[in-house]
Image (tube, rainbow, N blue to C red):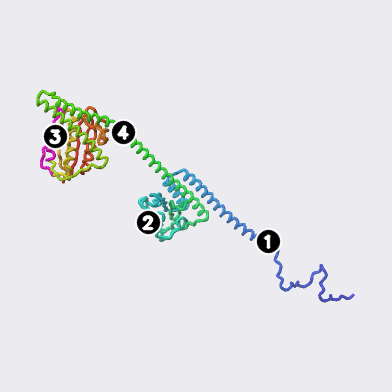
């Protein structure tokens, strides 16, 4: 049988390979080996795994940093909640910021002076004398530079006063502004000299925001606490003052009651003498003209004493109503003392008491009301003679720059230190209240004090204590 060629377009029978090279269809690429595809997939998976490991490591690092920051913030929150002092709040916040961000220099200001000034409370990296006086105005500490006061931000290189250059330092560190705002009130702020290679991440910004809110609330609470403390102290002072005033009123009421009781006695005594002696003279109950003259003299002395008591009461009334007047004029002190001397020598005194009068040298004229100065001197001399049982009462005149000093010194009963504090009060006498032994209304020194002040002079008392005598000094201006 003869073999024939297959017809055109027919395929060889299956299972039999062609004896020549296989031709690929036009445009079809040769198939990749299966091992190469697997290798590519493994390399891609390795790259993804490496990237995932890096991301996981970054996440762990950030998570650790965030966990540390949360622990720090929790610790700070506990500290801030336990303190009520703005200085402690500023110290804690400054320590946290400088440690967390490795700042070489930083400062914290707080609102003080009733809300009118930002005062530096704490600083780091600079000596205290360099920043302790760096006060800034409120409510805007940087009025020359546009700044969002309630927003954390880096300060422009030209921002702020000259002293901020010290915070930047020689390395020209960027300054970061951290405000502490509460209820639209800037209660304080921190300025940090950040390291140039320090980048603030999102978690850093979040931590700063949390710290800002905690600090602002703590500063606000400290401000409220201080305000309440000041109000409490003011109320306590007012309560103490009211108690003191009430005690003074009770004492004054007691003294006034004693004064009224004693004044009625003091007024009746000379008045009784006047009426008694006058009745004796009118009834002719005297032996001779000399005895009648003595009775009239006693009646006259009682009248003078009564007049003095009434004048003291009237002068006090004028002082309290503001109607007491003095008329200063230039007069000779030597002549005035010569007028006072015979009146003082006529005052009743114990025989054992000597009245020592100064030698009147040439004295300059003084600017006083003569009648009122005479009234003061006679009152001082009368008191000294009344309270001295033995020894002497001495008058002395000294010249000082711009004024003369007149002293009345006695060797009498003296004045205790406690009594000296109230001797120039109304109705008071040396030994508390009104002594029946010595009499008097207790108004003389009060009137003398007012008269000397109205004439531009002074009056003072000095005594070493009971039984050690007393020295009264008055100063009068030279004309």
- Nearer the observer: mark 2 or 4; the answer is 4
Cα distance in 3D space between marks 2 and 1: 67 Å
Report the span colored magenta: 335-364
Residue 276: name its quadrant. top left
Q: Which residue is mark 2?
A: 163
Cα distance in 3D space between marks 4 and 3: 35 Å
Q: Which residue is mark 4?
A: 253
| Residue displayed at 17% across by 40% down | 371
Cα distance in 3D space between marks 2 and 4: 63 Å
Cα distance in 3D space between marks 4 and 1: 114 Å
Q: Element type at marker 3?
A: helix
Q: Element type at marker 1?
A: helix
- Nearer the observer: mark 4 or 1; the answer is 4
**Which mark is drawn over residue 343?**
3
| First reached walking from the N terminus: tag 2 or tag 4 | 2
Magenta stretch: includes residue 361: yes
């Amino acid at each position: 049988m003869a073999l024939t060629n297959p017809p055109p377009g027919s395929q060889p029978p299956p299972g039999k390979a062609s004896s020549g090279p296989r031709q690929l269809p036009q445009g079809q690429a040769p198939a990749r080996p299966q091992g190469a595809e697997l290798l590519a997939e493994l390399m891609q998976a390795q790259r993804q795994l490496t990237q995932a490991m890096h991301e996981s490591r970054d996440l762990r690092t950030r998570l650790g940093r965030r966990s540390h920051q949360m622990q720090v913030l929790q610790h700070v929150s506990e500290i801030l909640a336990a303190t009520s002092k703005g200085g402690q709040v500023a110290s804690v916040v400054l320590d946290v910021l400088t440690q967390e961000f490795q700042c070489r220099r930083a400062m914290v200001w707080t609102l003080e002076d009733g809300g009118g000034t930002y005062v530096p409370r704490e600083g780091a990296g600079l000596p205290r004398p360099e920043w302790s006086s760096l006060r800034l105005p409120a409510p805007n500490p940087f009025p020359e530079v546009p700044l969002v006061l309630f927003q954390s931000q880096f300060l422009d290189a030209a921002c702020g006063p000259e002293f901020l250059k010290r915070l930047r330092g020689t390395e020209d560190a960027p300054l970061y502004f951290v405000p502490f705002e509460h209820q639209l009130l800037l209660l304080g702020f921190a300025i940090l000299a950040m390291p140039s290679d320090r980048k603030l991440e999102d978690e850093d910004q979040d931590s700063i925001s949390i710290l800002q809110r905690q600090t602002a609330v703590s500063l606000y609470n400290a401000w409220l606490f201080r305000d309440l403390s000041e109000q409490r102290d003011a109320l306590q002072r007012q309560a103490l003052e009211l108690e003191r005033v009430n005690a003074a009123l009770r004492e004054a009421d007691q003294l006034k009651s004693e004064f009224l009781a004693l004044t009625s006695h003091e007024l009746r005594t000379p008045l009784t003498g006047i009426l008694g002696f006058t009745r004796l003279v009118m009834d002719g109950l005297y032996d001779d003209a000399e005895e009648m003259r003595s009775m009239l003299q006693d009646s006259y002395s009682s009248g003078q004493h009564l007049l003095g008591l009434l004048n003291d009461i009237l002068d006090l009334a004028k002082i309290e109503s503001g109607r007491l007047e003095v008329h200063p004029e230039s007069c000779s002190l030597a002549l005035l003392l010569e007028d006072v001397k015979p009146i003082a020598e006529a005052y009743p005194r114990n025989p054992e008491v000597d009245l020592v009068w100064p030698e009147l040298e040439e004295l300059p004229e003084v600017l006083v009301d003569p009648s009122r100065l005479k009234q003061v001197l006679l009152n001082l001399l009368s008191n000294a003679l009344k309270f001295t049982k033995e020894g002497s009462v001495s008058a002395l005149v000294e010249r000082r720059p711009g004024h003369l000093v007149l002293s009345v010194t006695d060797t009498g009963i003296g004045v205790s230190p406690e009594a000296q504090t109230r001797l120039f009060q109304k109705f008071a006498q040396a030994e508390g209240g009104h002594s029946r032994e010595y009499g008097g209304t207790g108004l003389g020194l009060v009137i003398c004090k007012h008269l000397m002040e109205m004439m531009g002079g002074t009056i003072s008392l000095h005594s070493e204590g009971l039984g050690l005598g007393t020295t009264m000094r008055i100063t009068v201006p030279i004309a």
